[in-house]
Image (cartoon, grey):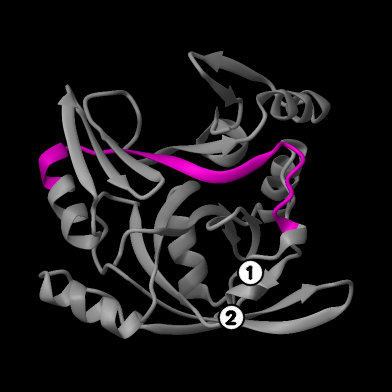
Amino acid sequence: MMNHIDHIILNTRNRLDQVAAYFQRMGFIITPRGYHSVGTINHTIVFKTDYLELFGYTEDTPSEKRLRLEQLPAGLITMTIKAHDADEVQATLIARGLSTIPILDVSRPVNYNDGLTANASFRVTRLESAPVPGTGVSYCQHFNPELVWRPEWQAHPNSCVAMTKLYINVSDLHAAAQIYLRALDIDKLVDTEPNRYILHLPSFEIILTAGNTEPLGIYKLTFGVNSMDKLVAELTKGGIEYHKESEHIVADTLSHTGCVLEFESIS
């Protein structure tokens, strides 16, 4: 089933260090820098079953990959779905009338346990055409997930345990929803509100919006925390400005990360 979020990619371009430092100030644990076999770099923020990938490039990154990241928006750019078998996922997508890029074999060394190193390996594909400009859907098969989801990287001081919602602004709600319904195995679609569709996955919602002032693409990510008090303490300690919107806390992140980050209690 193509219905579980694996990770979400945040494009930092050439500002990986600055963006990672900002997330640390919000009370997140940042993994050591990773160096992909294809030339890109990352840090991850790991939760119980998913993770946020801070993705970027260096002067040594191949020019075509560097150019692609420069052309994409800074901020949230890709939703990645768990794939048990990348070949099977690709065949399913093609049968549904969707084109994909060739499957990529990717790896990166992982440093853990104060000095041990092992290679984390993946097979990845993505839709050839984005459902919304600047917004990709990819699929990732992990060969050694134990190197990615490690307990020492999951105990965030701000008590965050998951990503729960992703907001995507689109020009045509119905047309975008039809692509996502083919690209994912959606539990249900709710369209009871004007200018909004909600696509339900297990423990996650994709919220498509239209008719607002947000730029097209992914513009907001919601995290689930066990303690709002711990979150506020970390934001305050890190000097992060925030405000409350109903039951949510919204951090002042747009100018630093290229997107809106909000938090909700899931305890």
Residue that mark 2 sits on: 144
Q: Calculate the distance from the C-alpha at mark 2 to the C-alpha at mark 1.
A: 8 Å
Position of the C terminus, as image quadrant, is top right
Give amino acid for label 2.
Asn
Position of 31 with respect to 149 (left or right) is: right
Q: Would you say the residues marked 2 and 1 are in contact, meaning their CB atoms lie under 8 Å apart?
A: yes
Residue at the image position 80 percent from the left and 31 percent from the top: 238
Q: Which residues are magenta?
A: 153-175
Image coordinates of residue 180 in percent, x first then y, are 21, 53
Position of 108 with respect to 151 (left or right) is: left
Residue at the image position 16 percent from the left and 31 percent from the top: 191
Is 64 or 114 nearer to us in this picture? 114
Q: Is residue 234 magenta?
A: no
Q: Residue furthest right?
A: 114
Residue 172: tell me if it is visible: no
Residue 218: tell me if it is visible: yes
Label 2 Cα crowd, 10 Å radius (few <14 / some 14-19 / many 20+): few
Residue that mark 1 sits on: 148
Position of 192 with respect to 53 (left or right) is: left
